[in-house]
Amino acid sequence: MGNLLINEPPLQVLPSLAVKLDSADKALILQQIHYWLNRSNNVRDGFRWIYNSAAKWHEQFPWLSEKTIQRYLKDLEKRGLLITGNYNKAKFDRTKWYRINYDALDNLGSALGLTVPTIGTERPNGMGLTVPTNTNRLPETTTETTKENSAAVAAPSSIESDFEEIWSAYPNKKGKKQAFNHYKAWRKKSAKHSNDYLFSQLKLYKQYIAQNKDWYRPMDGSTWFNGRFYDEYQVSTEQKHEGHEYWTGG
């Protein structure tokens, strides 16, 4: 067997994204950033971020030069698909931090008449990666259908009413349309995905908000419903605010 045939987990990307970006390489970079974001534990300002040196990016895309990768990252930033930040401890450290603007990505998919799958393929393990420096590639996917992911789900009317129930309890009601699309996709993915789970996660998230309200504000609803309910937060069991179990942003 030739050593240039697939014997390792391949990088993968939607052809439609490559067409829209006029570059398969840019689409692969964006997809790989999404992969690492779903495994990152770097939460700043309510969002997950990743950062990497040009040399480490080059390890993941060895056919591209470091300068080319930097140029592609800059182009994705100009398109509004990538948002950059600087959360480095040292002032002289200008390493860029990246996160994906999933609302912009959804709009890009809508222009193509597609539903862009922005929810991760698996639950982040809570440990995340401080610096995603290894060269693991995206896991191989198959079209095999299991009983779990093919199980019948609630009718659309039931999903809508269930969403309204959990949405009414969420403290930051921005991006309702996108939030519902994410919620609907999540519910359809497995019969085990239920409001009971979301309410339990929301309860913990509200506790975190209440205990850190001096500096933290709840993320937009469109963000939380895009798989961010899997985030893990350190919540104290002590009651800090008498008479108010949760802060609801009111």
Image: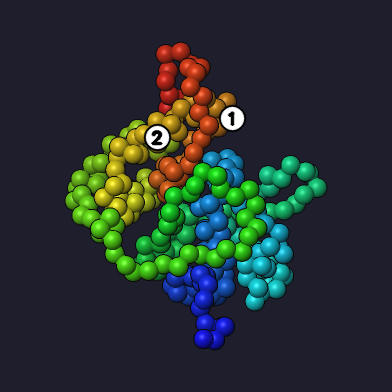
Where is residue 178 shown, x and y percent of the image?
A: 38, 50
Judging by the rendered image, the residue that carries numbered circle 2 is 202
Q: Is residue 55 left or right of residue 145?
A: right
Name the residue tied to disc 1.
215
For residue 222, say whether it is visible.
no
**Would residue 98 be seen by someone viewing this image from the given angle?**
yes
Q: How many marks?
A: 2
Which labelled disc corresponds to residue 89? none
Q: Is residue 22 left or right of residue 110?
A: right
Q: Earlier in the sequence, mark 1 or mark 2?
A: 2
In this rendering, the answer to whether 91 lies above or below 169 is: below
User: Disc 1 residue type?
Assistant: Trp
* Residue at disc 1, secondary structure: loop
Q: Position of residue 98 (x, y in %)?
A: 61, 54
Instruction: Tell me where residue 41 appears, x and y as whole percent.
Output: 57, 45
* Quarter assignment of residue 64: bottom right
Residue 123 appears at what percent x and percent y? 44, 50
Identify the residue at image location x=74%, y=42%: 89
Q: Are marks 1 and 2 in contact (CB under 8 Å)?
A: no
**Where does the C terminus fall, quadrant-wise?**
top left
**Extreme residue in the right direction:** 92
Position of residue 232 relative to residue 138, above or below, is: above
Say which residue appears at 52% left-offset and 76% top-offset: 7
Q: Nearer the viewer, mark 1 or mark 2?
A: 2
Neighbourhood count class around disc 1 (C-alpha, 10 Å): few under 14, some 14–19, many 20 upward: few
Q: Write the residue at 52% across / 82% down.
A: 5
Q: Residue at x 68, y 54 (%)?
A: 96
Name the amino acid type tagged 2.
Answer: Leu
